[in-house]
Image (tube, grey):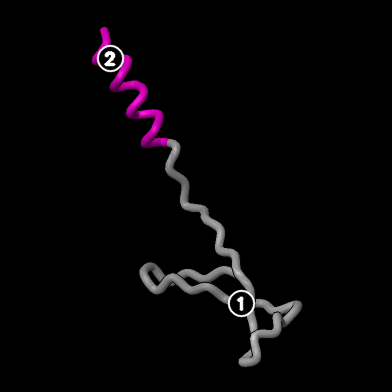
Amino acid sequence: MRSIVLSCLWAALLMAQVDQGRISGKVTDTSGAIIPGVTIQVRNEKPERSAK
């Protein structure tokens, strides 16, 4: 019985993996000043996918 419960729990944890993430940070110029309103593009080259 215990192994069945653990198997179900393990399966639930595996299904909880998602293909989302978050990147945070700041864009600065050479003097260290923050540049407001910047748009960056992140590219995953394998497979070819990008997001803004």
Question: In the drawing, does residue 29 fall left or right of residue 14?
Answer: right
Q: State which tag comes first along the sequence, 2 or 1.
A: 2
Crowdedness near tag 1: few (<14), some (14–19) or many (≥20) residues, C-alpha within 10 Å: few
Name the residue that disc number 2 marks.
4
Kindly report the secondary structure that dominates the magenta region of the rendered protein: helix
Residue appearing at x 61%, y 92% in the figure: 30
Residue appearing at x 43%, y 43% in the figure: 17
How many numbered discs?
2
Name the residue that disc number 1 marks.
40
Between 19 and 28, the one nearer to me in the picture: 28
Instruction: Point out the residue furthest to the front here.
Output: 31
- Label 2 vs label 1: CA separation? 47 Å
Start-end of magenta stretch: 1-15
* Residue 4 on the magenta span: yes
- Do tag 2 and tag 1 residues touch (Cβ < 8 Å)? no
Crowdedness near tag 2: few (<14), some (14–19) or many (≥20) residues, C-alpha within 10 Å: few
Q: Could you tell me residue 9's position as x and y percent?
A: 36, 23
The three-letter code of the residue at mark 1 reads Ile
